[in-house]
Image (spheres, helix red, strand yellow):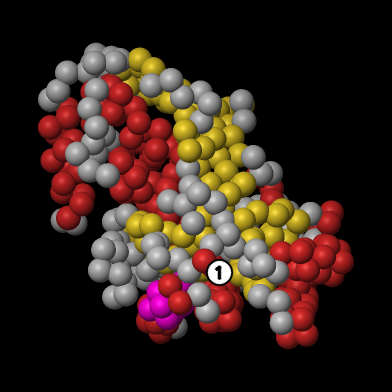
Amino acid sequence: MKKFETILLNEASEIHSEKVLHSEGSTSWISPSNIAIVKYWGKRPGQIPANASLSLTLSKAHTETSVSFSYDRAIKEPRLEFKFEGKPQEQFEKRIKKYILEIREFLPWLNHTKLSIDSSNNFPHSSGIASSASAMSALALTLCDIEEKMYGRKTSHDFMKKASFLARLGSGSASRSVYGNMAEWGMTACRKESSDEYAIPVTGIHDDLLMLRDSILIIEAGKKKVSSSFGHDLMKSNPYAKLRFEAAEENMQRLCSVITGGDIGQFIDIMENEALSLHAMMMTSSPGFILMKPNSLKAIELIREYRRESGASLGFTLDAGANVHVIYTMKSESKVEKFIDSELKPLCENGLVIHDEMGSGPERGVKYDV
Ligand code: DP6
């Protein structure tokens, strides 16, 4: 069994034998989305990543989740009411129910608790921005809060580490959203404190790489064509998987020194290689997927051309979809934004570009009262 998991299971049985001090209350967390620079694509059973990944935490795109709880020892199964943006949402509710059942060994009080969850995103669901990272991290944070309040005690571990562990079980990329600036999840030779069980904050970031901008070109609004879980699964039979996992580790190691050294050119080089490798994996899976659209390719060409001509520090990355994230430094912001407006915006559906930037991580929401 994994190390932190064992510690949390021991803590769970200890807490469960304690008296509940507050049987009712509510809490709320706002948690951001993140964009991976080194991609997580492929996993082993138990939500263990096939390679380490590293992401930028966004500032604006977030999920706010409010949870009211009511504990009653007579209840023997978790009870759940879920609303998304004020309305019932069957598909999300099913996923959350499954998640709650899966994590109750770590939070045994869930078996005796009724939860009313209300979750909303401040970005359009159809924009293609990954919502599982912000949603599952916000939920994990509220659950950690509820436990502390219920039993009137602090977790014996780092609150964020436990939240990251629980968020990971909901969605791998969510483990990274609990930390600001940059976060890293998965064992990598370049960070001895790294773990497959939870993410860690990236420290020692060079000033030039702080406050990076992320303008998301919405090339295609609407749902992703491949669910992440299906995509991860396809890596099991992808003939290039082994090489990909090795290349990701090499990129992590290169990135470690680039992050402290601040070489933006190298940073962009690694980021773009990772984005194209992710899509190469999707194309070479069986069935194979082409998720980029002609306008995604046009945007990539224009970004590279503009970089060559202007010398500005900008590059692109992609998620498992057609949208293009333009990443650039604060210093080049004014000229890059002009370029985006004139050259890239016309490639977007309804001209939609979402301007975001590196953010400081989750915060308690307004409905916090525990
Ligand atoms: C392409 O975290 O959504 O965004 O663990 O199955 O929920 P699950 O997958 P998910 O996968 C994210 C894939 C990615 C790359 C990344 O964020 O690292």
Q: Quadrant of residue 293?
A: bottom right
**Residue 209 position within the rendered picture, expressed as x and y whole percent measured from the top left:** 54, 67
Q: In the figure, 239 relative to 347: above or below?
A: below
Answer whether residue 93 is visible to the viewer in this image. no
Q: Is mark 1 within 8 Å of ligand 1?
A: no
Label 1, residues with CA under 10 Å away: few <14, some 14-19, many ≥20 = some
Q: Quadrant of residue 184?
A: bottom left
Q: In the figure, 270 relative to 123: above or below?
A: below
- Looking at the image, residue 124 sits to the left or right of residue 58; the answer is right
**Residue 5 position within the rendered picture, expressed as x and y whole percent measured from the top left:** 21, 49
- Which residue is disc 1 drawn over? 208
Q: In percent of the image, x 42 and y 59: which residue is there? A: 183
- Looking at the image, residue 296 sits to the left or right of residue 66; the answer is right
Q: In the figure, 181 relative to 67: above or below?
A: below
Which residues lie in the magenta part?
A: 251-259
**Residue 47 position within the rendered picture, expressed as x and y whole percent measured from the top left:** 34, 57
Which quadrant would the C terminus be assigned to in this image?
top left
Secondary structure category for the residue under label 1: helix
Q: In percent of the image, x 59 and y 34: which residue is there? A: 120
Q: In percent of the image, x 33 and y 35: which residue is there? A: 144
Q: In the figure, 299 relative to 167: above or below?
A: below
- Looking at the image, residue 315 sits to the left or right of residue 278; the answer is right
Answer whether residue 338 is visible to the viewer in this image. yes
**Amino acid type, callout 1:** Asp
Q: In percent of the image, x 30 and y 15: which residue is there? A: 23
Q: How many marks?
A: 1
Which quadrant would the N terminus be assigned to in this image?
bottom left
Q: Nearer the viewer, residue 19 or 231?
A: 19
- Looking at the image, residue 199 sits to the left or right of residue 120; the answer is left
Inspect the magenta stretch and tell me whether residue 307 lies in it: no
**Residue 239 position within the rendered picture, expressed as x and y whole percent measured from the top left:** 43, 82
| Main SS class of the magenta portion in the image | helix
